[in-house]
Image (tube, rainbow, N blue to C red):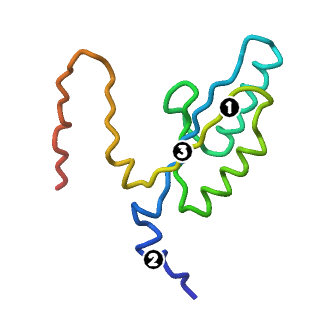
Amino acid sequence: MIPSLPSESYRSGYRLMWLVVLFDLPVVDPEDRKAAVSFRNFLLDRGYTMAQFSVYMRLVSGKEVAETAIAEIERSLPGKGTVQVLTITDKQYENLRTFRSRTKKEMKNPDQFLLF
């Protein structure tokens, strides 16, 4: 039997969620630094990618998966510092604007690729 494909609502930009983890952890003492590195590695091991220093992101398939991931983060919190988790839909993430520097650089679109 052929498994059915996920419904269109499963792949909807309103169902897919981005988890944004923002944290400010102390790193002055060796013990605190070790806890911060451990937390960062925890996020990397679970598929998060670094967007900026202390900001990690991961795309999940829905609110239920997001809640499970948030509970995992809560269980893995370091002893000190602040961790915040923001959830946004993929549709909201579409509106993200990224600026790389103050100088404007002309962006050239890639040349068209021709197939024969």
Q: Circle 1 — which element?
A: helix
**Which of the 4 image quadrants contains residue 27?**
top right
The reply, left or right, for residue 30 in relation to residue 69 is right
Image location of residue 106, percent across then percent down: 17, 24
Measured Cα–Cα span from mark 1 to mark 2 = 34 Å
Please tell me the numbered disc located at residue 40: 1
Tag 3 residue = 86
What's the amino acid at mark 1?
A: Arg
Q: Is the Cβ of the residue at disc 3 closer than 8 Å to that at disc 1? A: no
The quadrant in which the C terminus is found is: bottom left
- Residue 30's place in the image compared with 49, above or below, is above
Residue at the right extreme? 31
Secondary element under disc 2, as helix, strand or loop, is: loop
Residue appearing at x 20%, y 21% in the figure: 105
- Say what amino acid the circle numbered 2 marks: Ser
Q: Is residue 63 left or right of residue 28?
A: left
Q: Which residue is mark 2?
A: 7
Q: Real-space Cα distance between discs 2 and 3?
A: 26 Å
